[in-house]
Image (spheres, coloured by chain):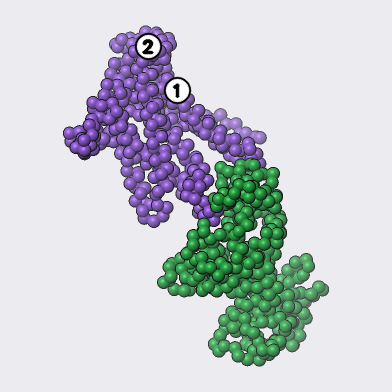
Chain colours: A purple, B green
Amino acid sequence: MDKTVNQKAWFLVLPVFLVVAFSAVLPLMTVVNYSMQDTFGNNQFFWNGVGWFKELLDPSTDLGGRFLASLGRNLFFSLVILAIEVPLGIVVALSMPREGWTVAACLVILALPLLIPWNVVGTIWQIFGRPDIGLLGYVLNAMGFDYNYVSNDVDAWVTVIVMDVWHWTSLVALLCYAGLKSIPEAYYQAAQIDGASRWAVFKAIQLPKMNRVLLIAVLLRFMDSFMIYTEPFVVTGGGPGNSTTFVSVELVKIALGQFDLGKAAALSLVYNLIILIVCWIFYTVMTNAGVERKVQAESEPAVEPKPSAALKPVPALKPREGVA
Amino acid sequence: MARIDLVDLAHSYGGNDAPQESFALKPVTMTWRQGGAYALLGPSGCGKTTLLNVISGIITPSRGKILFDGKDITPLSTQKRNIAQVFQFPVIYDTMTVGENLAFPLKNRGVPKADIDRRVAEIGRLLDLEPYLNRKATRLTADAKQKISLGRGLVRNDVAAVLFDEPLTVIDPELKWQLRSKLKALHRELDLTMIYVTHDQTEALTFADTVVVMHDGRVVQSGTPAELFDKPAHTFVGYFIGSPGMNILPAEVRGREARIDGHVIALNRAYDNLPAGAKIEIGVRPEFVEVVAPAPSLLTARIERIDDLGRIRFARVRVGDAKLAARAPGGFTSADGSAGLKFDPSHVHVYADSLLVEGAA
């Protein structure tokens, strides 16, 4: 194959190189640099090698203890909201109308929570749940439930989870709805002819056809919930005690509260790495399910998206520090 | 296995109050006998798919009744109707194997496992799907997928009828021929009523023993391929069936003769009671018109071109404004481009407002 060689073309990519260098590579390298040093303020830095990383992974140290505890809370949180939002989103998508003006109405209503800024969502629920003036908190207490998210760990967790479900189930539902809409009418007609029950239609047609969008939904929801900061910070501030302190909340405390730049940088890197690895594993497993099918059928070449695409959706280098 | 009767059946997508001219399916009463191989033939948008979907229950008709063996099943849902249908584009359940796909309609109806296995094996054998039965049904070629769809339609042996909605559209011409012969063989072997929708006359004429021609929401003729060819009941049938289609010419008909441009063409039968004010036309298939050297007794035509189809040659000619096709015998040439047309009187039909008029002997 003849390829035209034109070295001047490099100038065309140069702007992108520069933008990426200043927006991603240099800040990342700064973080790497900090993670190897200790500072006592005054812009004085001391070499610490991999010391922070060792501490991070050692639960007996203060840093390691806080990191691993918040990581555990964070993973639990992500699992819980995935377990609620994905099935719920599917159910919502299935029960949405398929045509008529009600479709538009449903879409608007579903999209509303997605359009509200994170800290506003936090504020809404912070007030909504207050036992003295909040509608939810007041009503619950009036009904005899001793609900107070400021003092009770379980109440705080329930509030944060319900808030996330309220905020993000729409996303899963909208993605699933898009997947459902792409199923040709003939499939439903054929299933009718074949005498399929509602459940069989779901299992044989709808779920397989939603496969792809569900993969995206789970990835997005996992990453977002794993990086969650604003909403719980606004509602509970990480409390009561440390019970709703997620990794990003801990990170901000260390970086901006204590100004321990070295520790914070090391934590950021590990945090970022975990997200990348989990997403990669997840995506590989999900796409391999498709590849197996391909090997079995072997007849037609099928276009599979390259796994490298998995890394693209990871948006920020560090999770939403700027919001604090 | 059943006889299907349509009684004054009609459907309008705009509701029953819409003017009848806008009905997708205009009122029709007809019978489909048990075990017949029917083709429902007509151009796109003529209502054939609507009729099919009404029979299968996907659409509830706005008017009329459908009887299976005399039992009214109009209000029944598709699931309860005991009908199988194969769609234009293959429908495959991706997560299942080919065998599971074939078993799906039986499994949903609670057929015992041993019966399912036997039936799936049989259909797999008939459709040459045996090597694929344990394979996932995704990523097969389009024709393999469509075979699976056909298989799902044929797997139940208790169905009243199997309906095919242009099932071979996505198949290569070569395989089309094979699959169609296969369907015909299956029809003989399984003794099922089959209704096959198509807009391709070759497909219809080779598959069916009865062809039902639809035009503009109406069933215009139903008969054997030979009947449709020899005696089209509607000018549309004459024009639509046959290649080239029937020649239709406006004419004045009186008694045993038709007049075109003051020229007389003899007819085999007498037409004395033609409705007054109707549009009178004569129709004759190109196979029964011959171009010969011009003569004063013959209708004169101008030859535009001669198509050589190998086996037969057709001259495309013009009489006044009307375009005609006529058989050109071997060795026929025309020096100045003009020719005489010789009609075979026994094959000239008379139409009043597009409908065939039977003359008196």
Residue hosting label 1: A273
**Chain holding disc 2:** A
Question: What residue appears at the point 44 percent right and 35 percent down from the top-left corner?
Answer: A218
Secondary structure under tag 2 reads loop
Observer-nearest of A139 and B165? A139
Question: What residue appears at the point 32 percent right and 15 percent down from the top-left corner?
Answer: A260
Q: Which mark is residue A60?
A: 2
Question: What residue appears at the point 51 percent right and 61 percent down from the top-left corner?
Answer: B57
**In the picture, residue A51 is in which quadrant?**
top left
From this view, report whether residue B108 is shown above or below residue A313: below
How many numbered callouts?
2
Q: Amino acid at mark 1?
A: Leu
Q: Amino acid at mark 2?
A: Ser
Quadrant containing the C terminus of chain B in the rendered view:
bottom right
- Could one spot residue A159 in this view of the protein? yes
Secondary structure under tag 1 reads helix
- Could one spot residue A34 in this view of the protein? no
Q: Position of residue A273 (x, y in %)?
A: 45, 22
User: Quick one: label 1, few (<14), some, or many (20+) residues within 10 Å?
Assistant: few
From this view, report whether residue A192 is shown above or below residue B137: below
**In the picture, residue B287 is in which quadrant?**
bottom right
